[in-house]
Amino acid sequence: MKKLMLILLVAVTTLGGTAYGQTPVAHVNTQKVLDTMPSRKSAMTELENFERRAVKELQETQQQLQADYEKLQREKATMSPTAYKFEEERLMKKSQEFQTRQQELDQQIQILSQDLNAPILDMVQKAVAKVCKAEKISYVIDESSLLYSGGRDITDLVVKEVLVLEKEKEAAAVKESN
């Protein structure tokens, strides 16, 4: 559906442009812009570190649950049915707690990702807006949405602008901390 709307937008823009004059349209490789941003790299590192710690915690818990279950199976013959039932219920409860913790960590990872990426994406949007204003561009489409690209590529201009914005943000943070 999005691609159909994009094709329709490009077709209307192209047809309208030939009838009423050119409507400036450009494209940008957002992924390339993001890959050049130091703040994005540090955000990705922070997110990866958090994910690594979460995975380690879950693996250790899962291994402990597995060991406890295997121990219970080995000792089943020497346990009374009531004691076995209590131990089995205890392990079931631990398993449910494990699943709850897994869901909590998944949610925390999503929230952290959103929190870390929101200012970065905002900066990219500001950079695109500044480039569009300076270059008198009416529409910008991300390259990932294009079926064909023969138009103007403003990726390098956006990269330069986003790096300037990052330096300004960094300088303001240093000035604020002093």
Image: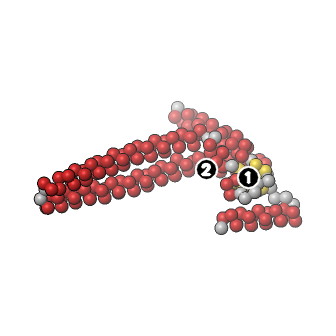
> Residue 7's x, y, as percent?
74, 64
Q: Is residue 81 above or below residue 118?
A: below
Q: Is residue 137 visible?
A: no
Q: Amino acid at mark 1?
A: His
Residue count near mark 1 (Cα–Cα under 10 Å), binned few <14, some 14–19, many ≥20: many
> Residue 100's x, y, as percent?
35, 57
Q: Amino acid at mark 2?
A: Asp
Q: Is residue 21 above or below residue 113?
A: below
Residue count near mark 2 (Cα–Cα under 10 Å), binned few <14, some 14–19, many ≥20: few
Q: SS of the residue at dot 1? A: strand
Residue drawn at (31%, 58%), measured in percent from left and top?
A: 96
Which residue is disc 2 drawn over? 122
Mark-to-mark CA distance, 1 and 2: 18 Å
Q: Quadrant of the N terminus?
A: bottom right
* Snapshot colouring: secondary structure
> Residue 18's x, y, as percent?
87, 63
